[in-house]
Image (cartoon, grey):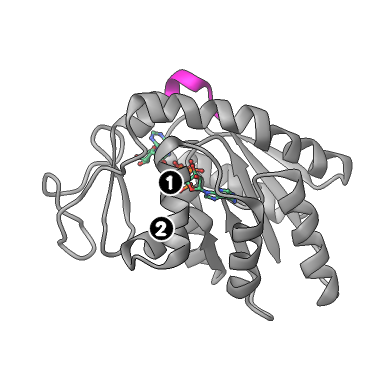
Amino acid sequence: MIVVFLGAPGAGKGTQAKKLAQDMNLKHISTGDILREEIKKETHLGKKAKEYMDRGELVPDELIIAMIEQALPEDLGVILDGFPRTVAQAQALDEMLRKHHKSVSCALLFEVEDEVIVERLSGRRVCPNCGAIYHVKYSPPKVDNVCDVCSTSLIQRDDDKEEVIRRRLKVYKEQTAPVIEFYAQKNKLKTIKAVGPIEDIYKTLRNAISNGC
Ligand code: AP5
C-alpha cells in the first residue's frame, strides 16, 4: 500500500502518519523530517534546503525527487507525508512507481481552516531527537517541555513563526493545491475533516483506508 498524505502545513499529517505507520507497519517517509536531518548534519542538500525552508518556500523539485528515489523502499507499504507537493513531483512519483509495477493506492487530504493552522503551528513543539510531535494546549507532554518518549528537551521549529506560517500557507495554495486535482482526476482522492480530537480523526482515517485504499 502506498498512501499519500496531502494537506496544508499543520493539518496534522505528521501526527496521524506516526500513529498509522506504527499500527499498520508502514514506512513513514516525511520529506520535511528528512530535510531537517540533512540540515542537522550540515550536508550539501541540507545547506541548500535551509535557504528555502527558512523562507517558507518549497525546496526545488529536482532535489526532492532525487531524495525520494533514495528513500522509497522496494517492497514495504509506505506513507508519503509532505510529498508530492507539486504536480511535477506527483508525475515523477508515478514514473518511479511504474518502473516497479506499482502505483499510489490513495491520496488522503486533511482539511483544516487557516486560522486553526496558525494556532496549531504556533503551539507546536517537537523532539529534536526522536521526532515526537506535541502541542502546548492540544497534545502536551507529561512533563512541561520534555519529550515523553526519550526525555529530550522540546524545541520550536524555525519555520513555525507566524510570518513564515502565512508564507507556507500561501505557497501551499499556489503550488500544492493542484496536486489535489491531480489525484481527484485519477479517482484516488479521499478527504478527511481534520478538526477535532486527534483520536477521532485517526478513526476516520482508518475507516477511509479500510474502505478501499
Ligand atoms: P514539512 O515538515 O512537511 O511541513 P508541513 O507540510 O508544512 O507540515 P507540518 O509538519 O508543518 O504539519 P503537519 O501537517 O505534519 O502537522 P503536525 O502533525 O505536525 O515541510 C517543511 C518544509 O520543508 C516546507 O515548508 C518546504 O520548505 C520543505 N519541503 C518538505 N517537503 C517538500 C516537498 N515535497 N517539496 C518541496 N519542499 C518540501 O501538527 C501540527 C500541530 O498541530 C502539532 O503541534 C500537533 O500536536 C497539533 N495537532 C495535530 N492534530 C491536531 C488536532 N486534531 N487538534 C489539535 N491539534 C492538533
Which residue type does callout 2 highlight? Lys
Kindly report the secondary structure that dominates the magenta region of the rendered protein: helix
Which residue type does callout 1 highlight? Glu
Q: Nearer the viewer, residue 203 or 81?
A: 81
Determine the residue positioned at 41% across, 64% down. Answer: 38
| Residue 104 visible | no
Q: Position of residue 128 (x, y in %)?
A: 26, 58
In this figure, which residue is indicated by the disc labeled 1?
51
Determine the residue positioned at 80% across, 54% down. Answer: 91
Does residue 108 belong to the magenta stretch? no
For numbered disc 2, what is the local secondary structure?
Answer: helix
Figure quadrant of residue 144: top left
Q: Position of residue 111 (x, y in %)?
A: 59, 31
- Crowding around mark 1 (Cα neighbors within 10 Å: few <14, some 14 to 19, many 20+) is few
Q: Which residue, as the protein is rendered here, is positioned at the far bottom?
A: 74
Determine the residue positioned at 53% across, 22% down. Answer: 113
Q: Quadrant of the C terminus?
A: bottom right
Identify the magenta region. 112-116
For numbered disc 1, what is the local secondary structure?
Answer: helix
In this figure, which residue is indicated by the disc labeled 2?
47
Circles 1 and 2: CB atoms closer than 8 Å: yes
Is the residue indicated by label 1 positioned so its CB lies within 8 Å of ligand 1? Answer: no
Q: Position of residue 141 (x, y in %)?
A: 20, 47
Q: Position of residue 68 (x, y in %)?
A: 62, 66
- Crowding around mark 2 (Cα neighbors within 10 Å: few <14, some 14 to 19, many 20+) is some
